[in-house]
Amino acid sequence: MFNPTRQFCLHIFTETSCYYLKNLKSSHWADLGNIKTKSMDKHACLMSQKKRQKPVVWVEQILLKMLPHQDEEEPTSYRGSCGSCPVTVRKMPYLGSEDVVKELKKALCNPHIQADRLRYRNVIQRVIRYMTQGLDMSGVFMEMVKASATVDIVQKKLVYLYMCTYAPLKPDLALLAINTLCKDCSDPNPMVRGLALRSMCSLRMPGVQEYIQQPILNGLRDKASYVRRVAVLGCAKMHNLHGDSEVDGALVNELYSLLRDQDPIVVVNCLRSLEEILKQEGGIVINKPIAHHLLNRMSKLDQWGQAEVLNFLLRYQPRSEEELFDILNLLDSFLKSGSPGVVMGATKLFLILAKKFPHVQTDVLVRVKGPLLAACSSESRELCFVALCHVRQILHSLPGHFSSHYKKFFCSYSEPHYIKLQKVEVLCELVNDENVQQVLEELRGYCTDVSADFAQAAIFAIGGIARTYTDQCVQILTELLGLQQEHITTVVVQTFRDLVWLCPQCTEAVCQALPGCEENIQDSEGKQALIWLLGVHGERIPNAPYVLEDFVENVKSETFPAVKMELLTALLRLFLSRPAECQDMLGRLLYYCIEEEKDMAVRDRGLFYYRLLLVGIDEVKRILCSPKSDPTLGLLEDPAERPVNSWASDFNTLVPVYGKSRWATISKCQGAERCGPELPKTSSFAASGPLIPEENKERVEELPDSGALMLVPNLQLTADYFEKTWLSLKVAHQQVLPWQGEFHPDTLQMALQVVNIQTIAMSRAGARPWKAYLSAQDDTGCLFLTELLLKPENSEMQISVKQNETRTETLNSFISVLETVIGTIEEIKS
């Protein structure tokens, strides 16, 4: 049959020289229709093999191989740029077109293509490719079901993938493929049996359970380990299809028996399936025979299996000290594993099992120092970040544990921002007399980083170190002011403000460094810090009144009310020590704040100071002349070492990454179970210093286990609703506790927040009698409303609790938590 395209191409190459063919551009080849560049690459070797032949000979052989077969889809002719002769090209489908589905359906039904296994597979691959790109390919479902009847395993896998994707959309048609899948479950080839069983368990459609139950049971007893692996996981999938149904006891017993299977992957899959099936009952039970069996099989598991088994072994508690150390000896080698997941899992198991042996816990943390340092230098950014978070957690119990390796935590230029921040935090905790100079030099280099956020974090880190090594840090901070960079100057001034409050010995050096820095501060935080310093220590700064005068003159253009209120307080304080220079500007500022200012908070502050001045200067001094520093704050002291048991259960979890409070919220949103009260880590508490010392925080956190009581965090209850509910309920419990001395409401409020108890209203400190109203709610919806009544003259505190549902056990648990909190505060006070 005459083919004009073939003759046209031969004519072109006959009239063209070999030199032109050798240097032909891709744009010229595009005009030749179906000629593909990849095909040219495959057959380019013909040039070297037949270079002595005439050009027409080898060119014709190339074209014969590259031109489409006669039984492919019909071509379309158009007038190309090569001339007036028709050039055959294939119509190119585009995403979202119905023509694509029609074209593929036609190709799947083409007997010529079905006869060619490779071409048939290629068409199926095109269907899968379009499916993954988002094109709706459900129109070829019947054709794909027919394609599953083949001995080609690759083709079966592609078709089964397609069916699992579109089975929920075409459940009636998907049932037609069940027969083929059931037949394949009895195939002599174990790969086919496993593939068919896995696909059947993945068909998310109603009514499929009755078809897959028997194949799964057969698969659990299959001789091939691959089929057993698939069948074990299929049990969990089958349970999820009907999660509301009762647990099949026979199936659970079968899975427990498979824990002794010869294949290690089957064992691990059994653990995961049993955990999923028995989730409502608390998960799989790890008794002594199972625990010892798993420990003996650990060496045969892969790294993923070892990490899973270590996690499950946390549920087993050895019966004797001898058994405990036998288990620890078996696990000793896994502390040196090449997998970070296995090392972390083994470390956590050591810490949990050895909770009564602190020296063993310390020895384990020393041994995992090497793997943790290697993880901190890993190319995987995620692994590096998590390792750094765990290093910070270990430093809470072992300060200076990594001090000899402080250079491992120096930042690299190519590292992401979040890893740099973690390393800076670690460096602050590793500073000692031997490495302080090197660490400060490294942090000084970070202060000029191109990232403003990282530079500011480094400056704050120097400020934290300055509480111990004041002179060196103040010198570095003073030199940074000379750079006259806005973001640097702002943070340095904020650091100076905190430093003079905590370390009064550096006040003179700070006052000498401040003049001239006001020109490089634009943000509100920096302005507030500078104004505070000028107001409190203005008698030591010669140009303090003149700097404040510039702020007064520009007060109308100031957009931050907090800056205006800080300016009022600072100028009034400076007026007390330098009245002649500040009297006029103070009057102008008060007039503006009272008569022209629109912000009510600023206006009220101005009225308060104006009326205070009318009372007299002595009264102003009594109120405003507070201490300029407080070295006795707990922030100055080294944080108390936390026992390892306080965080051992959080090790190798996401708690070190997110923090307890935030992870509890995330877990609650994901439907995960929460266990015990958690400490909220809000910035306000961190900034204001520890109201409760660290050693007492541990006591508040480690409240007695109150059975099923789990208080909901962040309960939002309005005062009106509280009052209405309080009046409608009767007192369910009332008792009196002894109390001596003064009472600190802030301490109580923070301690209550630790255990997720909300404060609705509270009397001011010193009120007689003193009252507080509290609310809390457990995870079942039971509401607890509480009144605390303190009568100092009687040295007692009366507790009254009301409950919207009568639950004696839950009420007793709540009372126990409340008593523990109040008892802890009483000990803190004394």
Image: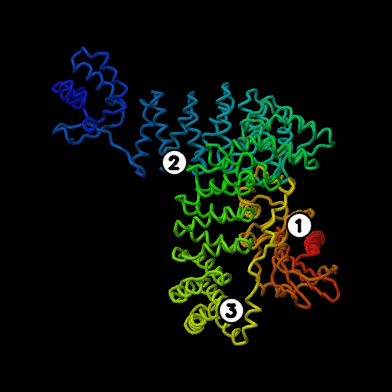
**In the picture shown, does residue 641 fall above or below 324?**
below
Q: Amino acid at mark 1?
A: Asn
* Residue at the spot of label 3: 576
Q: Are marks 2 and 1 in contact (CB under 8 Å)?
A: no
Kindly report the distance in space between the C-alpha atoms of the residues bearing marks 2 and 3.
83 Å
N-term mark: 3 or 1: 3
Q: Quadrant of the C terminus?
A: bottom right
Front position in the image: 103 or 111: 103
N-term mark: 2 or 1: 2
Q: Are marks 2 and 3 in contact (CB under 8 Å)?
A: no
Q: Give the SS element for disc 2.
A: helix
Q: Give the SS element for disc 1.
A: helix
Residue 752 coordinates in the image, percent (x, y): 72, 63
**In the picture shown, does residue 129 fall above or below 20?**
below
Residue 731 coordinates in the image, percent (x, y): 80, 71
Kindly identify the residue that appears in the image at 21 percent across and 34 percent down. 77
Q: Is residue 618 left or right of residue 804?
A: left
- How crowded is the residue under tag 2: few (<14 C-alpha within 10 Å), some, or many (20+)? some
Q: Amino acid at mark 2?
A: Ser
N-term mark: 2 or 3: 2
Kindly report the distance in space between the C-alpha atoms of the residues bearing marks 2 and 1.
63 Å
**Residue 138: numbered disc:** 2
Q: Is residue 704 left or right of residue 340?
A: right
**Residue 696: numbered disc:** 1
Residue 29 coordinates in the image, percent (x, y): 23, 30
Q: Amino acid at mark 3?
A: Leu
Quadrant of res 43: top left
Residue 199 coordinates in the image, percent (x, y): 55, 34
